[in-house]
Every structure is written in C-alpha cells, then in structure tokens.
Image (cartoon, rainbow, N blue to C red):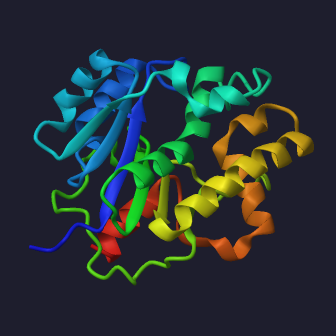
Amino acid sequence: MSIDNIVIISGYWLVPNKHSHHKYHQWFHNSLKINQMTYFFCEDQKGIDYIKGFRGDLPTAYIKYPLSGFHSNQYYNPRWTHPVHVPSVELGKIWHEKIHLMKLVKDNSPPTEFYIWCDAGACVYRDDPPPPVRLNLKDIHSLPHDKFCYSDPMLEDDYHNFSGTVYIIHRDMVDRIYELFQEYVDVCNDMYNDWRCGSDQVIFTEMMKDYPDLFYKLSEGYGTNLKALYDHHV
C-alpha cells in the first residue's frame, strides 16, 4: 500500500454567498467525495454533523472553527464587498482565511508532501463525483516543490488571472506563500482600496505579477488543477 502524499483542506460556513445553501447541498453529494484525508473546518458541531452526512466513511478530521476566531478578522475591511463579486464581508473573510487554514494544518498535523485547499462546492465536481481512487501522486516529483500550482480562469480582467477554487502547494512553500499573502493584502489595499481586496483571487494575481517564478499554471478554468491531478498525476 502506497503512503499518502496529499491532504485536503476545506471548510463550509453558512454565510451570505454567491449561491444558496440549497445549491451547495445539492453539490455536496458529489463535490465532497474526494478519497483522501481531509481536514474540514466548520462553524460548530451542527456544521460538522451536516458535513459528515456527505463525507460518510471517507477519512476526515473535523475542526470547529467559528467565524469569530478567524485570523482575517484582524484586518478585513468592511468596504471590501461587492453585490456580485464579494457579496458579504463574511464570505470575503472565508476567502482570506483559506491560506491561513492551510498553514494551520501544515503546522499541526502529520507531515505530507502536498497540501491542497479545495472549495467545498468545487465546480469541477458539482454534477459528477471525483474518481473513487485515492488521490495520491504516482510520483511526488511530477509537480514542482518550489511553486504554487494553480489554474487560470482565462478572464480578460488583468486583476483576475488566478482561480481560488483549488490551491496546490508543496509543504516547503506553504509558509512562503502565507507570508506573501499577508504582504499582498496591503499591496492590494494600496492599489485598489475596494472590493477587489476582498478576493483572494485578486491578491494572488497581484502577487503572481511580481513573483511569476513562484507560480506554475497547471491548467485553465476554475478548479481544473484538481481534475488535472486525477487525469495526469494519480
């Protein structure tokens, strides 16, 4: 039996969102079926019990992590909202919290090679579940250890060339990316000082402009870097 070389980090909080809770409920029957150890963050025990209904026997560690305890509460500006793009302060805080949760898992769990943030309702597996095989790399060197493996949504906006649906980061890069993210929150605020600062996708896009060598485009489209793993690396 091969040793696992990936863990998944995800979470779900009931907040004003781009989509309804009913939609997420439908998607979770497929999107939460990734066969790999998953660290799943929820507001409270009620949220944990809800997600357990979808994960079933799949390996999962459930963590109570209320919005009131978010790291992003320390700096998130209520002005960073937009009716379409960032529909609530709470949602923006969740997007900002993702890289912090990856660092928490990296620092407080058994080590592995790659850490993957995956949105709970990841669009690539909303209509059909992911393959049932264990999500492990056949060769841990098939992905770069010194770059952030991302997908490009292929939009015309020059401030949005990074999809936040799925992050794929080697353990040696998590701290570096985390530190740069905190720095580029301020860069984004100085540059835009509007809703764009609420989007992790915009912040990573600005970071990528200055540090292109830290990023590796694995695919095109929202969340397709996860599908690329299944198709070419598992």
Residue drawn where x is 33% and y is 52% of the image: 109
Q: Is residue 152 above or below residue 13?
A: below
Q: Which of 147 and 222 lies nearest the eye of the viewer?
A: 147
Residue drawn where x is 74% and y is 59% of the image: 207
Image position, residue 229 (x, y; %): 36, 68
Residue drawn where x is 65% and y is 48% of the image: 201
Res 127 visible: no
Location of the N terminus by quadrant is bottom left
Res 41 visible: yes
Q: Which of 90 and 164 lies nearest the eye of the viewer?
A: 90
Image position, residue 156 (x, y; %): 75, 55
| Side of 90 where 32 appears, left or right | left
Task: Name the outermost residue toward the front.
Answer: 108
| Side of 232 where 94 appears, left or right | right
* Quadrant of res 48: top left
| Side of 135 where 68 appears, left or right | right
Task: Name the outermost residue toward the right.
Answer: 190
Q: Which of 16 and 66 lies nearest the eye of the viewer?
A: 66
Total marks in image: 0
Image position, residue 18 (x, y; %): 55, 26
Image position, residue 78 (x, y; %): 75, 20
Location of the C terminus by quadrant is bottom left
Q: Is residue 122 above or below residue 177?
A: above
Residue drawn where x is 72% and y is 64% of the image: 208
Q: Is residue 156 above or below residue 188?
A: below
